[in-house]
């Protein structure tokens, strides 16, 4: 029989989760449908929902239930905060749920209300300051806001008991179990292999010509993209895809809302954005629905989420096998636009590599270097080894070292990303860790599923999706990031799979 305290806790977690799905839907609507003069009401709706969600998870009753569940069965032991052996009387699955609930409850209760309010107000002001500073390429105008964001981020870590390890605290928010020191080691190894590869590709006489792809009607693109994402396994009976300025994926497995954007002269952008978001959507659709709201039905963290989007976008959809199946379909949709483009030219355009200044426009090879740069700067900022005012110089030095480029202005350099304006630190590494996990999963899946790419060539992705469902999605958030990598792939997280994959794919294209 289920413990009544446990049953009450999960019922409360489910309410919190359901409120979150309402907020997600309103956020989706804001970016997809909202009429311009309706933003004020939407802001009020979102603020009220945030308040309700905070009240749910911080409720004193949740604290009482956690204390009961964390106490030893004889009732004598003192409740201990933060998980550990004292949870051993619970079933292993219950332990996972209680630990995550403790984590969320502590975060919601340990931060004083006036601190939370101050940070919310500052985030809003800093976002507007960043928008204006970026428009004028004026880093100095944004610097004081960023300085305050760093101070607030450090203060929060102190309040949560991570004093002196503020950057680790933030990394752990996105990827439980990861640390700055561990990432530093992984990224150094990646850098040593990746910088020479990018230099060689850049020096190659082989050049891709994406500008050949012109005049692809939005209607045609939309139809093709629906066909592709449906074949990958996205369930359109519990999800949909729309258009927004910035592509994203929102919602839960029961109702996924993805977006993409269309440009008649950049058809690969819409397609690959959609496939990327589909990877996120497939993950959410594969999480155990019966556990929605608890850690057992929750994604494993940002790196794991990103590994799913990158695996489908890159390892799968940029492969020769994938295009053996879809190239004839694309040509049938766009016969005139593709009439003078050979298969090799099309495949090269799909796998174009060109160092650039802007992270969000980067190809899958150079993208990682953009993340190495941001991680290094964030790490030094939080270690007190770099001052905010010195960021532009440090940015440009790293950009030259990693990508051989110098930004002509701050808008295309240190001011390009929205993350720091929102006080979001420790998030960037997830993108690159996600690429590493994707490559490691790819090696594991390929050896577990012989002939996998023959499936792709037939437009069949069911075996890969089934493997991910069983080996990744079904796990929910049972394990911390590094532990889950070891469990699923049989090896510790390492950049070597990613380097092997990039050499294999891009070596055959660019290095003859
Ligand atoms: Zn993503």
Image (cartoon, rainbow, N blue to C red):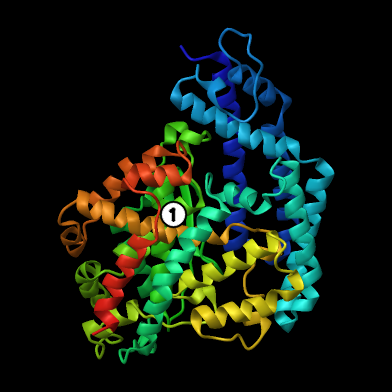
Secondary structure beneath dot 1 equals: helix
Q: Is residue 141 left or right of residue 345?
A: right
Q: Is residue 33 visible?
A: no
Q: Is residue 272 visible?
A: yes
Q: Is residue 269 above or below residue 276?
A: below
Point 21% across, 61% down: residue: 456
Q: Quadrant of the C terminus?
A: bottom left
Asked where in the image residue 460 lies, by quadrant, the reply is bottom left
Callout 1: 10 Å neighbours few (<14), some, many (20+)? many
Q: Is residue 395 above or below residue 225?
A: below
Point 21% across, 52% down: residue: 447
Q: Is residue 123 above or below residue 137?
A: above
Q: Which residue is mark 1?
A: 280
Q: Position of residue 207 (x, y in %)?
A: 34, 89
Point 68% across, 25% down: residue: 63
Q: Nearer the viewer, residue 235 or 53?
A: 53
Q: Is residue 161 left or right of residue 339?
A: right
Disc 1 within 8 angstroms of ligand 1 (CB): yes
Q: Is residue 119 left or right of residue 379?
A: right
Point 21% across, 67% down: residue: 321
Q: Which residue is farthest right? A: 114
Q: Position of residue 452 (x, y in %)?
A: 19, 56
Q: Position of residue 413 (x, y in %)?
A: 62, 79
């Amino acid at each position: 029989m289920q413990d009544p305290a446990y049953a009450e806790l999960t019922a409360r977690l489910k309410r919190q989760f359901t409120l979150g799905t309402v907020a997600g839907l309103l956020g989706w609507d804001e970016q997809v449908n909202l009429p311009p003069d309706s933003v004020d009401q939407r802001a009020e709706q979102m603020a009220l929902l945030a308040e309700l969600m905070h009240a749910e998870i911080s409720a004193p009753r949740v604290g009482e239930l956690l204390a009961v569940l964390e106490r030893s069965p004889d009732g004598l032991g003192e409740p201990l905060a933060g998980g550990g052996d004292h949870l051993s009387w619970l079933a292993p699955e219950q332990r996972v749920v209680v630990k995550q609930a403790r984590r969320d409850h502590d975060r919601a209760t340990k931060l004083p209300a006036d601190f939370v309010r101050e940070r919310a107000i500052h985030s809003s002001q800093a976002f507007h300051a960043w928008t204006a500073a970026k428009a004028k390429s004026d880093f100095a105008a944004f610097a004081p806001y960023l300085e305050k964001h760093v101070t607030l981020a450090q203060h929060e870590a102190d309040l949560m008991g991570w004093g002196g390890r503020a950057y680790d605290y933030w990394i752990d928010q996105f990827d439980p179990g990861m640390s700055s020191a561990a990432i530093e080691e992984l990224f150094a190894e990646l850098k040593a292999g990746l910088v020479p590869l990018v230099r060689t590709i850049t020096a190659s006489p082989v050049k891709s010509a994406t500008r050949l792809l012109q005049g692809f009607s939005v209607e045609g693109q939309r139809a093709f993209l629906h066909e592709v994402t449906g074949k990958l396994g996205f369930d359109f009976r519990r999800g949909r895809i729309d258009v927004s300025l910035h592509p994203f994926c929102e919602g839960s497995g029961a109702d996924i809302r993805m977006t993409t954007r269309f440009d008649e002269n950049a058809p690969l952008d819409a397609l690959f954005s959609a496939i990327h978001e589909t990877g996120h959507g497939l993950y959410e659709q594969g999480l155990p629905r019966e556990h929605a709201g608890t850690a057992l039905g929750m994604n494993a963290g940002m790196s794991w989420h990103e590994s799913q989007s990158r695996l489908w976008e890159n390892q799968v959809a940029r492969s020769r096998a994938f295009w053996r199946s879809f190239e004839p379909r694309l040509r049938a949709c766009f016969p005139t636009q593709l009439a003078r483009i050979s298969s090799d030219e099309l495949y090269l355009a799909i796998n174009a590599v060109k160092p650039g200044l802007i992270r969000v426009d980067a190809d899958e090879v150079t993208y990682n270097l953009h993340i190495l740069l941001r991680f290094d700067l964030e790490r030094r900022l939080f270690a007190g080894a770099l001052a905010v005012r010195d960021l532009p110089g440090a940015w440009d030095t790293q950009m030259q070292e990693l990508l051989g480029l110098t930004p002509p202005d701050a808008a295309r350099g240190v001011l390009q990303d929205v993350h720091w304006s929102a006080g979001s630190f420790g998030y960037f590494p997830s993108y690159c860790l996600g690429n590493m996990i994707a490559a490691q999963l790819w090696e594991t899946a390929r050896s577990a599923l012989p002939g996998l790419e023959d499936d792709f060539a037939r437009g069949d992705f069911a075996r890969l999706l089934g493997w991910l469902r069983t080996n990744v999605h079904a796990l929910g958030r049972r394990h911390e990031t590094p532990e889950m990598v070891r469990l699923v792939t049989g090896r510790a997280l390492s950049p070597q799979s990613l380097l092997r994959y990039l050499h294999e794919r891009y070596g055959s294209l660019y290095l003859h």
